[in-house]
Image (cartoon, rainbow, N blue to C red):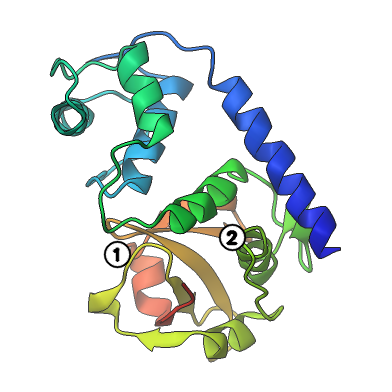
Amino acid sequence: MRFFKRVVCVVLTTLFLLVTTCFAECGIGDTGTEVYRVQVELLKQGYQVSKLDGEFGEETEQNISSFQERCGLPVTGKVDKETYYSLLSREHLPSEIKPRILRLFDIATQMLTTKYAWGGENSKGFDCSGFTQYCYSCIGVDLPRTADMQYEFGKFVRKDNLQPGDMVFFSTYESGASHCGIYLGSGKFIHAGSSTGVAIAELDNVYWRKRYYGACRIL
């Protein structure tokens, strides 16, 4: 089963790279899937992304300009093909973002919009701990199956010391660690929610802030 999951992950990653070969330049005022992909990738690489809305605004322009400057590209604030493929190739990564964590984020974000399924643990449907177990298994980490056991698996970290790739936990339908997700950075985490399916949420959202239980470091 573990081998099968890893094969599925490789296939999904390959399909994702094939899909991204079709690209049109984008800049201020543009909207759509390509802009959303750019925003997600910026977030993965540690840039401050306050909204994942598929709308190319001033924040996205500033982040792209910073990326272009760091990579030695012409600083235009627009995403041309060279900038887009440089962003995806990750040849100039922030030193604090480990390649293994980026692989984890790749797997997790490829599952965005996957429906929620109680007991689900594959791309046909996930529950929260099935989702995290699946994502970590794709990078060679075998987590326990349930949220409370996953909480005990890693090393406890304080909320003010969260790093990308950490796991975050919440008390929802029962006390203790009953819901979980993967911290992306910039106050955001990705999880399989019962009302949203796999989605990106904010720790400061009123619902999640009240139910925050703790965090642990797996990697």
Residue 2 sits in quarter: bottom right
Q: Position of residue 140 (x, y in %)?
A: 64, 65
In what element is the residue under mark 2? strand
Indicate the amino acid at tag 2. Gly
Q: What is the C-alpha distance between the residues marked 1 and 2? A: 16 Å
- Residue 70 located left or right of residue 219: left
How packed is label 2: few (under 14 Cα within 10 Å), some, or many (20 or more)?
Answer: many
Residue 69 % position (x, y): 13, 28
Q: Give me the disc on residue 204.
A: 1
Q: Give the amino acid type for the residue marked by disc 1 in the picture.
A: Asp
Number of marks present in the image shown: 2
Left or right: where 60 falls relative to 184: left
Q: Is residue 57 above or below residue 6?
A: above
- Seen from the viewer's position, the closer of residues 185 and 211 is 185
Query: What crowding class fits label 1: few (fewer than 14 Cα within 10 Å), some (14-19), or many (20 or more)?
Result: few
The quadrant of the image that shows the N terminus is: bottom right
Q: Residue at x 21, y 32 (%)?
A: 67
* Element at label 1: loop
Which quarter of the figure has residue 113?
Answer: top right
Determine which of the numbered discs, if any, sits on residue 214 in the image. none
Is residue 123 visible to the viewer in this orientation of the structure?
no
Residue 96's place in the image compared with 93, above or below, is below
- The residue sitting at 19% across, 20% down in the picture is 73
Q: Is residue 187 above or below residue 159?
A: above
**Residue 136 pos. (x, y %):** 61, 64
Which residue matches tag 2? 193
Determine the residue positioned at 32% across, 25% down: 55
Q: Residue at x 53, y 55 (%)?
A: 104
The location of residue 45, given as percent across then percent down, is 32, 46
Q: Can see residue 166?
A: yes
Q: Earlier in the sequence, mark 1 or mark 2?
A: 2
